Amino acid sequence: MSHHDPISPLITPKAGAGLAQLNERSRDIFRQIVENYLATGEPVGSRNISRLISMPLSPASVRNVMSDLEQLGLIYAPHTSAGRLPTELGLRFFVDALMQVGDLTETERQSIQTQLAAIGRGQSVEAALSEALTRLSGLTRTATVVLTAKSNARLKHIEFVRLEPEQALVVLVAEDGQVENRVLKLPPGVPISALTEAGNFLNARIRGRTLAEARAELEVALQQSRTELDQLTQKVIAAGIASWSGGGGEERQLIVRGHANLLEDLHAMEDLERVRLLFDDLETKKGVIDLLGLAEQAEGVRIFIGSENKLFSLSGSSTIISPYRDSAGQIVGVLGVIGPTRLNYARVIPMVDYAARIVSQMLGK
């Protein structure tokens, strides 16, 4: 029999109400299908669902609801089985409308805090972030990623070293001990005194600032100090500032940790193939950097499921990412996890959010 039980319509009839208006019974059945998939990766059939749901329904009634859920595009039947799995649209709907995002337990908070608090003492920002990712990867059993700007370190000192008559080395020393060298083209006829004066001018103004902050400030300072600076010194300073005006893709650094977690819970050859595709995607850093860059425009956690994210659509992966900030409250990077679409969303989302906040605090000190 294919007629529906007369208990209640699948969708409460509200104009344009759409998926969000699934009735209680349909939500219950849909939730069982999704939660079973997230726990086991396996399809689940009507007989099992009729045992699991809170209201008494026959397998035939459950099948009717399942066929409606399928028409809505929320679930589908994999070719080998009579059971159903959620589609990407179904997962999205579940995450947005039905899932209770648990808050972290005090123990989990303590664990993340203790693990991340040890970071950053005497380490470079990159080393600290890498460590934070390794810890987050262990807690979430996923691969973890961070996108950071290389130029986020706060500056301590700058020096000009003449290499040739028209070339100097700019040595930038950061507060965390990182040293970066850039070769600078000098205007003809620059005396050593102009390099020294330029160095003094810059050192008086850059300490404790990131490259981006220093650049903005120096451009103003240079305008205001034109009268007291020798012209060649002005040119050296201007050339120095210009040499920092990177900030494009090559200035971004991508750190990925925990690849091995993606190999843990594989069910079939197609799982293995998906993970192989995901590894390929992670190797092509450009795409990952573009994707993570999107999250920098957002407040809070962003979730991309499967093909919503063109980069990982083939491997059917989900990405949960959150921006983090520096001490001035500026968003300076993004961290998060990449894993199969059957992530434990309710647990991972608050973890990513909390880890991003801890990293922000760490950078703020």
Image (cartoon, helix red, strand yellow):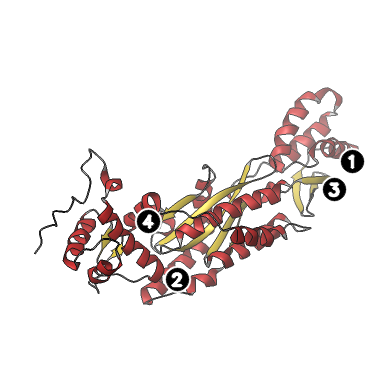
Figure check: 233 above or below 347? above
Q: Tags 1 and 2 in contact by the CB under 8 Å rule?
A: no
Residue for point 36% across, 54% down: 94
The reply to whether residue 255 is visible in this rendering is no
Residue 202 shows which numbered tag? Answer: none
Mark 1: which amino acid? Ile
Q: Quadrant of residue 316?
A: bottom left
Q: Tags 1 and 4 in contact by the CB under 8 Å rule?
A: no
As measured in the structure, the alpha-carbon distance from the residue carrying label 2 to the one carrying label 3 is 48 Å
Front label number (1 vs 4) = 4
Q: Earlier in the sequence, mark 3 or mark 1?
A: 3
As measured in the structure, the alpha-carbon distance from the residue carrying label 2 to the one carrying label 4 is 17 Å
Element marked by disc 3: strand
Residue at the spot of label 2: 276
Element marked by disc 4: helix
Report x, y in % for residue 58: 19, 66
Residue for point 39% across, 72% down: 271
Quarter of the figure with the N terminus: bottom left
As measured in the structure, the alpha-carbon distance from the residue carrying label 4 to the one carrying label 3 is 51 Å
